[in-house]
Image (spheres, rainbow, N blue to C red):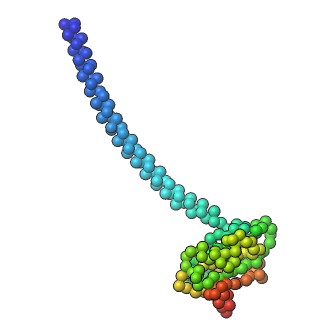
Amino acid sequence: MGSSSGTCRRNLNEVATRGEPQRSAAKRRRDLHLDSVDLLLVLAVVLLTGTLVMGLVWPALTSWLNRPRPGAQVHVRFDASSEGESSTPLIDHLLYLPEGYGRRDRKWPLVLYLHGVGERGNDLQKVGRSGPPGLVTEGRAFPVVLVSPQCPAGRRWEPDLLLQQINHDSSKYRVDTDRVCVTGFSMGGFAAWSPR
């Protein structure tokens, strides 16, 4: 009897041991499933957080990187609708501030350069290829605040809008309002001579 009860216990232990790895594998699969769900949740949270952060941080970062600074020509957007009535509320333009702009309490001349028909549209690189902005792109420095707006496709320069641009830039930057010059090429030259 002693030996048969020992055999019985051993057989029960073997059965219990044989069933345990199967339960462990099933439990591992279940744990893996939970890990996959957890991973998906973490990924969703990261993506959502990243989207929110990038939605808030990215515009601020690009704005800071594209801020006007001396010796650099940067893309700036002028909101003419905030200045008054206009049929073209947003005007993209290149802005160049001269070397030494922020170091001295000095006012600078303003040059408004108006491009020709071929540079109209929404690609500011076209504006930066010729005239004074093209020279700045090539590395030339000027002792002026250079403003080079881009006329929208299919439009012509609007004198009232250009005056708004000059008034806005004269108040925002250190501009000597007695030394404002408007120049241009082709359609821009015609607009520079427009009576207003």
The residue sitting at 36% across, 37% down in the picture is 31
Residue 146 placed where, x, y %? 70, 76
Tell me if I can see residue 159 in this picture. Answer: no
Residue 98 placed where, x, y %? 74, 71
The residue sitting at 72% across, 67% down in the picture is 70
Residue 23 placed where, x, y %? 29, 31
| Residue that lies at the very extreme toward the top in this rendered image | 2
Residue 116 placed where, x, y %? 61, 84
Q: Quadrant of residue 109?
A: bottom right
Q: Is residue 56 above or below residue 134?
A: above
Which quadrant is home to the C terminus? bottom right
Q: Which is nearer the eye, 43 or 190?
A: 190
Q: Which is nearer the eye, 86 or 127?
A: 127
Answer with left or right where residue 123 lies relative to residue 163. Answer: left
The residue sitting at 63% across, 75% down in the picture is 129
Q: Is residue 143 above or below residue 29?
A: below
